[in-house]
């Protein structure tokens, strides 16, 4: 691994901000709103921001929209925080997104799973090699959905992809993730990525950071969760999870895709740029808005 890439990954400790992509009423990208949201998030000490990831609805966007979203985000941070850009879909589109993001100023890439859900292992390896090989910046794999890997697979990917520098888990299987971390060691930096409600397990097995969707609505709460997790202050962490995180995740679990829809509705109720989601996601049902408002009220001490 490139020494500079290793040093970049080593510094990614604490919390990754994970901004949504705001849309206007006609579902076009609200770039002005995006810039405001990114600037606000950058005022908090996150280790990085990840734009056009899963919470950013990457799979609903064009390559051009994704690249422009990265450019606007980089400009809005004004050098105060690295921006990590999502890339995926298929080999040619993913490579184009990767090159565009690098040119737009992204510090690293988060490689999302490809469109094909039943790809053979060698095909997956070649897909990730192609996307990572399109750039000279560090990359992370995002092991989510059907992109499931054994410890031996992760070691192989680290061998085959020179700029693979960190790994984001989206499976939530801490037993398996701990085995992967033990087998590969400090060749990669380890990130927890399935949700704020999994902070206890992730920091318990020794990750150095986690990705937070709560960063969109209560950045200070995200940072408090990570701080308690890294210090192994379990009573404090469990109290925060019980009072603030579990009620939110219960709302998000009501329907597939609500992990984005609920966050956007909370942001809208808080006066932030958010807008609707794009299909195949659906907006929060009108009869559920009152419940989302209660969550907004609950979160006021952390805003």
Image (spheres, grey):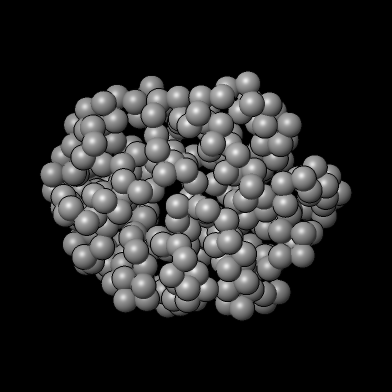
The answer to whether residue 236 is left or right of residue 182 is: right
Q: How many marks?
A: 0
The spot of residue 149 in percent (x, y) is 29, 36
Q: Residue 284, can we see it?
A: yes
Question: Image quarter for residue 233?
Answer: top right
Which residue sits at x=54%, y=36%?
Answer: 227
Residue 30 percent across, percent down from the top left: 61, 75
Q: Is residue 236 above or below residue 210?
A: above
Report whether 43 appears left or right of 24.
left
Where is residue 47? Give x, y as percent: 45, 52
Q: Nearer the viewer, residue 22 or 209?
A: 209
Q: Can residue 27 be seen in the rendering of this structure?
A: no
Residue at 24% of width from left, 49% of height from top? Answer: 6
Measuring from the top left, give residue 148's x and y in whole percent: 33, 37
Q: Where 139 sits versus 237, above or below?
A: below
Point 30% across, 54% down: residue: 8
Furthest-left residue in view?
A: 159
- Horizontal relation, residue 278 to residue 153: left or right: right
Residue shown at the point (26%, 63%) measured from the top left: 137
Q: Quick one: 298 or 148, which is closer to the camera? A: 298
Given residues 67 and 200, the one toward you in this image is 200
């Amino acid at each position: 691994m490139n020494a500079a890439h290793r040093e970049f990954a080593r510094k990614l400790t604490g919390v990754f901000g994970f901004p949504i992509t705001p849309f206007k009423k006609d579902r076009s990208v609200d770039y002005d709103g995006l810039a405001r949201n990114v600037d606000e998030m950058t005022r908090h000490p996150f280790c990085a921001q990840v734009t056009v990831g899963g919470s950013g609805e990457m799979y609903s966007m064009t390559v051009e929209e994704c690249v422009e979203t990265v450019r606007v985000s980089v400009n809005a941070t004004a050098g105060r925080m690295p921006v990590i850009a999502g890339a995926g879909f298929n080999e040619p589109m993913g490579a184009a997104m990767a090159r565009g993001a690098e040119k737009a100023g992204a510090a690293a890439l988060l490689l999302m799973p490809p469109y094909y859900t039943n790809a053979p292992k060698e095909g997956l390896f070649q897909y990730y090699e192609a996307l990572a090989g399109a750039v000279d910046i560090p990359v992370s794999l995002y092991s989510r959905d059907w992109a499931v890997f054994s410890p031996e697979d992760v070691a192989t990917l680290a061998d085959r992809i020179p700029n693979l520098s960190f790994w984001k888990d989206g499976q939530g299987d801490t037993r398996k993730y701990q085995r992967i971390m033990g087998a590969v060691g400090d060749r990669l930096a380890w990130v927890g990525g399935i949700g704020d409600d999994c902070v206890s397990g992730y920091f318990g097995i020794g990750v150095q950071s986690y990705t937070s969707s709560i960063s969109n609505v209560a950045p200070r709460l995200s940072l408090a969760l990570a701080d308690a997790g890294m210090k192994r202050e379990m009573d404090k962490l469990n109290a925060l999870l019980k009072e603030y995180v579990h009620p939110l995740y219960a709302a998000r679990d009501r329907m597939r895709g609500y992990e984005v829809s609920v966050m956007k509705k909370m942001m809208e109720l808080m006066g932030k740029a958010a807008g609707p989601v794009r299909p195949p996601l659906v907006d929060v049902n009108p009869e559920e808005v009152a419940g989302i408002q209660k969550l907004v009220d609950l979160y006021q001490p952390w805003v």
